[in-house]
Image: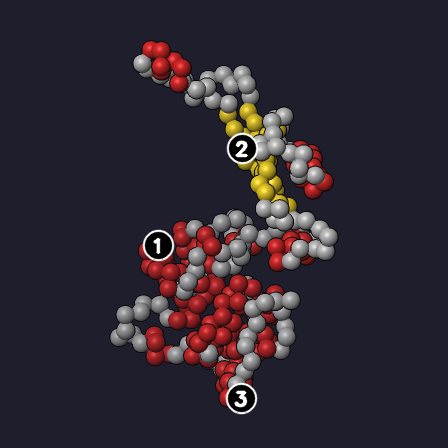
Amino acid sequence: MDKVVARKLRPWEGKALHAMKRQLSNAVNSLHARIILLSRGGVGNGQIARCCGCSPTWVRIIIHRFNDGGIDAVTWYPYYCHRAGPRKFMADVTEQIAEVALSPPKELIGLSVWSLSKLRDYLVEQKILRWISLERLRQILHERGVRWRHSQTWKDSTDPEFWPKYRRVRGLYRRRPDGGRRISIDEFGPLNLLPRHGRHLARTGHADRHRATYSRKGGVRHMYGAYDLERNELIGQFVEKKNWTTFLAVAAAARCCTSCWTTPAST
């Protein structure tokens, strides 16, 4: 169930949104009104995005705008784009720019990450605008609150069971299962077994330097860490190889008995 839904409409807001939906000459207002009305009708954000031809993140942004500022926050007034004003691009164009920036680039350009230059080339190719400088494009995205580093719209998993698994994991953070334990596991490495120079420094007064390509006769180690939320314990284990078999073995050991681990325990 979607957590981001439009709030309850006041009587006059419902009439105004239906009027906005019928605005054939203003596609921006019509789209935003459809999103709010569909959300109030119990339609999920993913289904709304498919019906309206936009991304789920853009649907959530419009709903957040409406919940915070009402109809004025999702309405485009034509006089905002008067030629005498400082704005160079019309509001509907900036809305399209933000919508494209929040869409998965994998489906649009075949790449996994947006950049300003790639976004500009795509906007020009799709004839959304004729030309724009990278700095002005950056300013528009900043004004619209687009933050690629904080956005996960294009970090989609290919696993069809990803969201059910995600919701189960998130549920464990909120509530411990009856009679169960919650253990969070992560890995770190590889760690080089570096030589130390303290003794030679004490004897000769200077430290020997080692090349970056020195022979690692001792090999490398990988560290697995596990945090037991119930016991408030952080434990670790070093292994020589890091793969799925060692990860599952460490996870099984942490699940069965964490008291048999030391902190850290070398293998």
Q: Considering the numbered disc 2 on the image, is that residue within a helix, a strand or a loop?
A: strand
The CA span between labels 1 and 3 is 44 Å
- Please provide percent x and percent y for residue 123: 44, 59
> Disc 2 vs disc 3: which is toward the camera?
2
Q: Earlier in the sequence, mark 1 or mark 3?
A: 3
> Disc 1 vs disc 3: which is toward the camera?
3
What kind of colouring is applied to the model shown?
secondary structure
Q: Nearer the viewer, residue 236 or 262?
A: 262
Q: Considering the numbered disc 1 on the image, is that residue within a helix, a strand or a loop?
A: helix
Q: Amino acid at mark 3?
A: Pro
Give the residue at mark 3. Answer: 11
Q: Amino acid at mark 1?
A: Leu
> Disc 2 vs disc 1: which is toward the camera?
2
Give the residue at mark 1. Answer: 134
- The residue positioned 56% from the left and 27% from the top of the image is 221
Q: Nearer the viewer, residue 68 or 32?
A: 68
Whether residue 33 is visible to the viewer of this picture, yes or no, is yes
Decide: is 152 above or below 259: below
- The residue positioned 53% from the left and 67% from the top of the image is 60
**Local crowd at mark 2 within 10 Å, few (<14), some, or many (≥20)?**
few
| Quadrant in which the C terminus is drawn | top right
Give the residue at mark 2. Answer: 189
| Quadrant in which the N terminus is drawn | bottom right
